[in-house]
Every structure is written in structure tokens, then in C-alpha cells.
Image: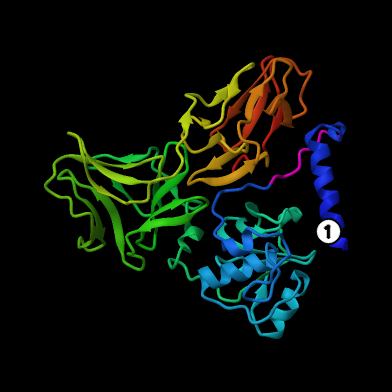
Amino acid sequence: MGPKAVWRRVRSLLTLLAAIGVIAATGAVTAPVAFAGTDDYPAQWRNTAQDSVADTWGEWNRECTSFVAWRLHSRNGYEMDFHADATQWRQRALAENVPVDTTPAIGAVAWWSSGHVAWVEAVSGGNVTVEEYNYSYTGRYSERTVSAGSPTAYLHFKDLPVGEGGSGQGAGVGGAHFFGKNQLAAGEMLLPDQYLASSDLQFTLILQNDGNLVLYGGGYHPLWATNTGGRAVKDAVMQADGNLVLYGSGGDVVWASDTGGRGSSHLQLQDDGNAVIYKDAGGSTWVSNTGGHATYTYDGANRLDSGGVLYPGRYLRSTDGRYALLMQADGNLVLYGPGYHVLWATNTGGRPGADATVQGDGNFVLYAGGGAVWTTYTGGRGPSYLVVQGDGNVVLYKTAGGSTWASNTGGHI
């Protein structure tokens, strides 16, 4: 068994011990990996044992280097012309005159000198969202948001230009403003950098400042667009006659749903991923045909009181509608920000049927199969309640006053 395989087993054992409370004495909660369900890594490499086959670019399957080579091929249109361990990627890039710096960009490769690479999916303020394989030696796909200074460097093989091929993820929701609901009523309009969000935050429909109206799901992945990037669009109007229209700065029609004359209507961004124009009198007139995604049930509040249980397929939502804490059917408890953007998770996927409860002793625990699989280690603090706050933080408060645990995601988007 090689050193890498030994280390994987050690990490797996530590993870198991933490889950069952053997190292609970530290009270530490490690930053989890959030699985957003957007893994399009080819099945012939994904569904076989790790390191058992080489991919098209000579990298071993289900390694970080293989996934990034795939991303560069499938998203950037760039073919890797070398294969090497991740620790060597910066040196190889420099040797080929590939720009290397500490400035993130959509489509760039985030490189860690410790020996890891990831594909930059989004840039928002001082943070980047990356997609990757084999983070923490799992051999699996993950998506996470980290400080832009976390990677040692960024390798710019062929960055995606702003407004092209999904790179709107960069402008994305991070620099935009929530319209406050999941629909656009007759007579209402979206301005550039405004967006609708589905009620469970799985999906967002944003009028980007490049003129493109884009529907995103699963970590800013584009599902549908008007393909009007580069046009001077001043607004998207749900007209009183039932037509959804993108108007240019000169008042010209840049795009339309061609549903005029149907009477008063509204545009609805549904939890199944579909954007639909419904006549107020009943019936639909236009659809984005992006539906078919899992739907979830709102628990009706932004908090879980002492003794309360969050069951699979249900979610809490902040009062301003921007953040949702979802107990996924796969056993992962995930905090989503606007546009289905993963901010935090318990990393307990693979345990279907798990539920989350605020116990009477003040501990917040995920149970699956009759046992605890994750906990805040706050037992003994007395009756408490959990709140999904409008600042993006999930906080456990004692009923008597004071907080005992937080997701530490306040101010994130």
C-alpha cells in the first residue's frame, strides 16, 4: 500500500471517529465538503475504482488533476498537453508560458502547493467557489467556497471571458440584488444585476449586467439563457399584455417570449427548476423547459425550536428569503445562499433518511439509522433553538439567552 492510500485510510478513520464522538472532546467542527449534485465527470471514470484507469489526458481517474483536465476540456475548450502530479502543475504551466498569479478568474485553475488543483467556478468579492475531485482524499466530486487567498496561485490556461459560456457565474448572484420573491408580476421589471430566486433557493433567474437573462441552478450552473450577452439591455419587463420582454437602452426589443396578447400574466421561478409564464386567469403560455429537479417543502419558519425536528426534504428559510437550511434526502444538511449557492454543510451525504433535531439539552444533532452522525457538541447548555438569520448565519441560541454554536457564514453570499 502506497503512502497516499495509507493517508486516505487514516483520514477516513479520523472522520469516522469524529462522527461517533470519539474526538468530540475538542469540540471542533471541521469545514465540510458540500456536494451540490453537479458532477458531470464522465461515467467511465467516475464509476470505477479510483486510480484504476487513465483519462484522455493521462491523469488517473477520480483524482483532482483528472477532473480539472476534464473541466478545462468541457468548459474552457482547452486540452491539457501534459500529465503530472498536482504539485508540479505550477512549474509545468510556467514552463509553457501560461500566466500564473494570485488573481482568481472564472475558468482558472486554483493551485495549492500542498498538491491539489480545482476549477474556479465563481468569483465573488474576496471569495472563490471551486469545483474539484478528491478533496480531503474522498475520490469524489465536491464544491466549496473559500477565501480567494486560500489557493497558493491561479493558473490561467484559458480563462472564460465574462459573459460567455457560463462565466456569468462570476458576476453571478454575488454582486447582484435579490428581487425579494420568486416571481415577476404583471407590470414589474428586473433591472441589470437583479434576480428572482426559487422559494427553496435551488434556482435563480438573474438579469446580468452583460445583457443576458440566465437561469442558474446547482452552484451557478446555467440551465437556460436568452443568449443576449453583450447587448445593452436596460430591463426585463413582464408586460401587462402577457409578454416578457428584454428592452435595450434605446427602447428596442432585444428578446421576447412572444406571448403578448394573452392577458395579464406573471413569471414564476419554480422549485423544480422551470421558469414559467402563467396567465393570471389560469394556464401557462411559456416555459423554459428546465424542470424535473427535486422539490422540497418549506417548514414554514426561520427557526427550529427545542424538541423540533427538520425532516428529510424540508427546509427552514431566513425571513428575507435569501438563505435556506435544507435537510436533503441523502442525509446532508446544507445551508444555501441565493441561487442555490452552498455556504455550509454537515458533509453527511450517503445517509438517506437522516433528520436534524434540537434536543432539550441544547444539542443540535443529525440522526440516521438510530445513531448520531453529526452534532454541535452543545449538550448540557439547556433548552435552545436554531435560527437561519438574514445575514447568512445559522445560530444556535439558548432560550435563556446567548448563543452556543454558529455556522460562521454571516455576511456570505
Is residue 311 or residue 175 the one in the foreground?
311
> Against 337, is 257 above or below?
below
Where in the figure is residue 51, as x and y percent of width and height?
73, 65
Q: Position of residue 223 (x, y in %)?
A: 41, 55
Q: How is the image coloured?
A: rainbow
Q: Nearer the viewer, residue 49 or 296?
A: 49
Instruction: Answer whether residue 404 is magenta in the image.
Output: no
Q: Which residues are magenta?
A: 26-32
> In the picture provided, is 170 more to the left or to the right than 98?
left
Going by the numbered disc 1, the residue's amino acid type is: Ala
Residue 339 against residue 371 in the figure, above or below: below
Residue 68 visible somewhere in the drawing: yes
Give the x, y percent position of residue 292: 40, 45
Residue on which the image places disc 1 = 5
- What main secondary structure does the magenta stretch of the protein show? loop
Q: Image quadrant for the N terminus?
A: bottom right
The image position of residue 334, as x and y in percent, is 60, 39
Tell which residue pokes out farthest to the left in this image. 261
Residue drawn where x is 57% and y is 63% of the image: 42
Q: Residue 391: which quarter of the image?
A: top right
Most distant residue in the bottom direction: 96
Look at the numbered disc 1 and give the secondary structure of its residue. helix
Residue nearest the observer in this picture, 315 or 177? 315
State the image quarter where residue 148 is shown: bottom right
Residue 397 left/right relative to 115: left
